[in-house]
Image (tube, rainbow, N blue to C red):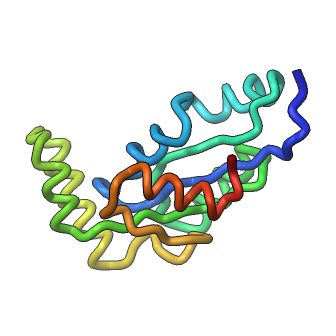
Amino acid sequence: MVNDRRAEAVLLTGVYGSGKSSVAAELELLRQNLAAVIPNYRRIGISLFVLAYFVRSAAEVQGIRETLGLPLRVARLTVPFSAIEQRLASDVTSGRRDDLREAAASIATAEGTGFEDITISNDRPIAVVAQELMTFLGWP
């Protein structure tokens, strides 16, 4: 099965707790090891890919582009820090406390900004955010 649609991808980026994974799950359920699965998906006609990862530098974005071998657009999700605290509060593990500290530090230094093609506020229902992203991407 060959899909005539040009393959492309979107990278959802934002600090821990900004909702990347939730939006990615709303758009696409199949996510696995990037380097191993992209060729398999392409072989069966899959042409749209959604990734969720917090990028800190242009070099990281470039590395992802090279690994994909596909056009990649970057969408950064933003959310007020108070919402991040609320989202992460339900998981009180030390790992989540570390994530919260890291999110605060990243926000304070504007780490991970400036590499995106679009910034989307994720303080609305997930379906609304996903639809805004799909409209930007021109995806069905």
Instruction: State the residue in front, 129 or 117.
Output: 129
Q: 85 left or right of 20?
A: left
Q: Is 135 above or below relative to 106?
A: above
- Tally the numbered discs: 0
Instruction: State the residue in front, 62 or 24.
Output: 24
Q: 116 left or right of 123?
A: right
Q: Is 11 above or below relative to 136?
A: above
Q: 102 left or right of 50?
A: left
- Identify which residue is drawn at 72% across, 44% down: 68
Instruction: State the residue in front, 68 or 4.
Output: 4
State which quarter of the image contains the N terminus.
Answer: top right
- Identify which residue is drawn at 33% across, 61% down: 124
- Identify which residue is drawn at 47% across, 58% down: 13
Quarter of the figure with residue 100: bottom left
Q: Position of residue 106 (x, y in %)?
A: 32, 69
- Identify which residue is drawn at 41% across, 61% down: 14
Q: Position of residue 34 (x, y in %)?
A: 62, 35
Q: Position of residue 62 (x, y in %)?
A: 67, 60
Q: Position of residue 134 (x, y in %)?
A: 60, 55
Q: 36 left or right of 97?
A: right
